[in-house]
Each structure stands twice: as C-alpha cells, then as structure tokens.
C-alpha cells in the first residue's frame, strides 16, 4: 500500500503526491511545475472535471489533459464510473494513451455496491489500472 499525499503548494515535498483541489480537480500547469521542482517525486493529477456532464466532452478533456502532461507520472479519475460500472471502452482508450504510467480509479469506486465491486476490479485490471482508491470513512465494518 502506498500513501498518496494531497498537496496544494509547490513548496511541499513528498514522495508520492496528488495535486488537486477540494473537488478532486487538478491544474495541469501547477502539476508540471511541481514535477520540475521535485523531480524525484511521483506526481499524480486528477482528470476529473465535474462541471461538464456530456460524456463525450468529459472523455476528450481526459485525453487532451493526458497528452498535455507528459511529465506527470499518473492520473486519477472518478469519471470512468457510469451507473455503478467502469466504462470499459473509456478505460481502454485511457490505458492506450497513458501507456506505462499510473491509472488510478478514484474514491467514487467505494460507492459501487459491494456485490459489483469484484466484477469492476476485473475490468480495472484488464485495462491496466494501477490502483483503486477506496474511501472507508463512512463504512460500518461491523454491519458487513
């Protein structure tokens, strides 16, 4: 397990960072600047853009952001989840563009019903997802 530090300042130096704001959206320019200043850090950015609702536009925002951030080490997205399932075609395209960089499914994965999670993990593995973020803050493990 790797700890990912959320940073908002170029002066903070950590080994594995996610450059994002409180809405899990990133500024690619700031991320590139961070990578130039901290070359030994693994830098991730969020590809989420929650102001857009059209899936075609969302996917193109993801693709273009990836193309413009070739120095970044990996990407986090929640917007590959559609109606409790991972969008296999979208993940395949992103995996092709990202190549050997990190592709991380964001914390919305934990909102997928438990009985569908293993199926979705298989889809993530098929498309070279590096990790899945899982938000455990509001889960009552005693009820499981």
Image (tube, grey):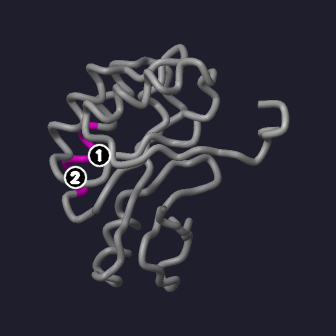
Residue under the image location 32 percent in, 37 percent down: 62
40 within the magenta span: no
Q: Check whether the beta carbons of the residues at disc 1 and disc 2 lie within 8 A of each other.
A: yes
Pinpoint residue 101: horizontal percent, then vertical percent.
23, 54
Pinpoint residue 33: horizontal percent, then vertical percent.
34, 74
Residue 65 badge: 1
Quadrant position of residue 125: top left
Quadrant position of residue 39: bottom left
Q: What secondary structure prevails in the magenta region?
A: helix
Residue extending farthest top: 83
Residue under the image location 25 percent in, 40 percent down: 128
67 within the magenta span: yes
- How many badges with numbers are in the image? 2
Identify the secondary structure beneath mark 2.
helix
Residue 68 badge: 2
Residue 144 badge: none
State left or right for residue 66 relative to residue 105: left
Q: Start and end of the magenta stretch?
A: 63-69
Q: Is disc 1 surrounded by few (<14), some (14 to 19) or many (20+) residues within 10 Å? A: some
Pinpoint residue 105: horizontal percent, then vertical percent.
44, 40
State left or right for residue 47 relative to residue 94: right
Q: Is disc 2 surrounded by few (<14), some (14 to 19) or many (20+) residues within 10 Å? A: few
Residue under the image location 40 percent in, 19 percent down: 55
Identify the secondary structure beneath mark 1.
helix
């Amino acid at each position: 397990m790797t700890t990912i530090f959320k940073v908002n300042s170029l002066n903070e130096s950590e080994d594995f960072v996610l450059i994002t704001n409180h809405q899990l959206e990133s500024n690619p320019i700031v991320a590139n600047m961070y990578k130039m200043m901290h070359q030994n850090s693994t830098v991730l950015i969020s590809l989420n853009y929650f102001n857009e609702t059209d899936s075609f536009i969302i996917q193109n925002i993801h693709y273009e952001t990836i193309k413009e951030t070739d120095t970044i080490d990996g990407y986090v997205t929640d917007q590959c989840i559609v109606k409790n399932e991972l969008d296999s075609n979208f993940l395949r395209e992103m995996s092709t563009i990202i190549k050997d960089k990190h592709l991380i499914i964001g914390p919305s994965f934990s909102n997928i019903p438990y009985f569908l999670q293993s199926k979705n993990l298989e889809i993530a593995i098929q498309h070279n997802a590096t990790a899945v973020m899982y938000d455990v803050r509001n889960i009552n493990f005693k009820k499981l």
